[in-house]
């Protein structure tokens, strides 16, 4: 366990160093001018001297290497910098928006896992029948459909045509923060969460179907059938545990796709979370905020892969045996 923890810590450190350096370099090479984006509509009223002062204030007049080392040094001291857009500490902005994004992604994660596993298990039980082919067709269609198009379609149908959900935002417009109830927040979060969960259903369903079919074709299930076990009893005794664990591992390993889908969903629904802040920071050249969000997303994805790895090692004794042999 000590060796495993040491390897993961080293990988995390190398991953953070690589991701932050490449992100800083790409922002530096980006055609977006941070000073111009910072000035915005007042571009014609700001002279060259004022532009130079703004660049000097934010350190944009320094060479790339010096800017990166300065930012990295501040980060190692616990300072993530100040956002150019909001004029607030980056840590405060991320902390304020984390709750909204965490609730959205958690709801979508649970829905996609539950619906995907149920659909995959039902398709495997009804193997080669009409319902199995229908579930596979729907899953392949979802997997090949862009997430933003699903979000726009859901908004058009459920928000505009039917009026069941609000069109966007995280809370009702015009209400004071103290007047917003939990029901209001859930009502505004429901449609983005449902939209985001749809994108994660297909891989879980198809993986569960394939794994459960493999289990049903095994010798011990054939022996169970010979003893008279059928239907739900056969699934609960032999299929559920063998198919649930791989699906759970895959679900934790999909944190990267979950965060990427949240960025698109929050942008379409104007949901005030980390995804919307990421898009805004990138378009307006807010380097400190963008770097802070990149670090958070990297830690989020790494945590999901780490949990998936731990679960996989816990349920598969062959991996523990290989680790002991190597040690």
Image (cartoon, rainbow, N blue to C red):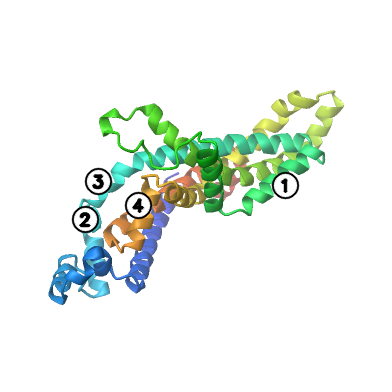
- Where disc 4 sits, the SS reads helix
The residue identified by callout 3 is 92
**Which residue is depicted at the point 39% across and 30% down?**
184
| Label annotation for residue 137 | 1
Which quarter of the figure has residue 245? Answer: top right
Label 2, secondary structure: give it: loop
Label whose residue precedes the other's in the sequence (2 or 4): 2
- Front of the two marks 1 and 3: 1
Distance, label 2 to label 4, CA atoms, is 14 Å
Q: Are marks 1 and 3 in contact (CB under 8 Å)?
A: no
Quickly name the residue at label 4: 277
Q: Earlier in the sequence, mark 3 or mark 2?
A: 2
Q: Is residue 216 above or below residue 147?
A: above
Q: Is residue 58 left or right of residue 185?
A: left
Residue 277 x/y as whole percent: 35, 52
Q: Is residue 295 above or below residue 321?
A: below
**Alpha carbon of mark 1 to alpha carbon of mark 4: how far?**
35 Å
| Residue 296 locus on image (x, y percent) | 36, 50
Q: x and y percent of residue 66 in the render?
A: 22, 71
Q: Which one is in front in this view, the residue at disc 2 or the one at disc 4?
A: 4
Q: CA distance from mark 1 to mark 2?
A: 48 Å
Residue 62, placed above or below residue 300: below
- Which quadrant would the N terminus be assigned to in this image? top left
Residue occupied by mark 2:
82
The answer to whether residue 312 is visible is: no
């Amino acid at each position: 366990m000590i060796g495993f923890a040491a390897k993961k810590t080293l990988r995390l450190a190398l991953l953070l160093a690589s991701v932050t350096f490449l992100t800083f370099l790409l922002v530096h090479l980006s055609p977006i001018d941070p000073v111009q984006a910072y000035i915005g509509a007042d571009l014609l009223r700001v002279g060259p001297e004022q532009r130079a002062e703004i660049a000097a204030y934010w350190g944009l007049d320094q060479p790339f290497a010096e800017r990166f080392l300065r930012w990295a040094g501040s980060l190692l001291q616990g300072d993530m910098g100040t956002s150019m857009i909001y004029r607030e500490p980056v840590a405060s902005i991320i902390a304020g928006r984390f709750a909204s994004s965490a609730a959205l992604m958690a709801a979508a994660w649970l829905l996609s896992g539950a619906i995907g596993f149920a659909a995959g298990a039902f398709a495997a039980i009804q193997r080669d029948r009409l319902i199995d082919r229908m579930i596979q067709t729907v899953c392949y269609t979802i997997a090949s459909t862009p997430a933003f198009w699903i979000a726009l379609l859901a908004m058009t149908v459920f928000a505009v045509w039917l009026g069941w959900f609000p069109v966007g935002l995280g809370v009702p417009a015009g209400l004071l923060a103290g007047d917003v109830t939990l029901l209001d927040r859930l009502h505004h979060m429901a449609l983005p969460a449902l939209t985001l969960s749809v994108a994660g259903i297909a891989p879980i369903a198809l993986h569960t179907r394939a794994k459960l079919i493999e289990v049903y074709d095994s010798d011990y299930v054939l022996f169970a059938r010979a003893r008279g076990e059928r239907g739900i009893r056969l699934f609960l005794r032999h299929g559920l545990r063998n198919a649930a664990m791989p699906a759970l591992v895959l679900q934790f390993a999909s944190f990267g796709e979950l965060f990427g889908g949240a960025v698109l969903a929050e942008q379409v629904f104007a949901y005030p979370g980390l995804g919307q802040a990421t898009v805004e920071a990138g378009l307006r050249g807010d380097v400190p905020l963008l770097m802070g969000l990149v670090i958070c997303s990297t830690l989020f994805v790494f945590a999901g892969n780490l949990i998936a790895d731990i679960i996989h090692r816990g349920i598969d004794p062959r991996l523990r045996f290989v680790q002991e042999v190597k040690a």
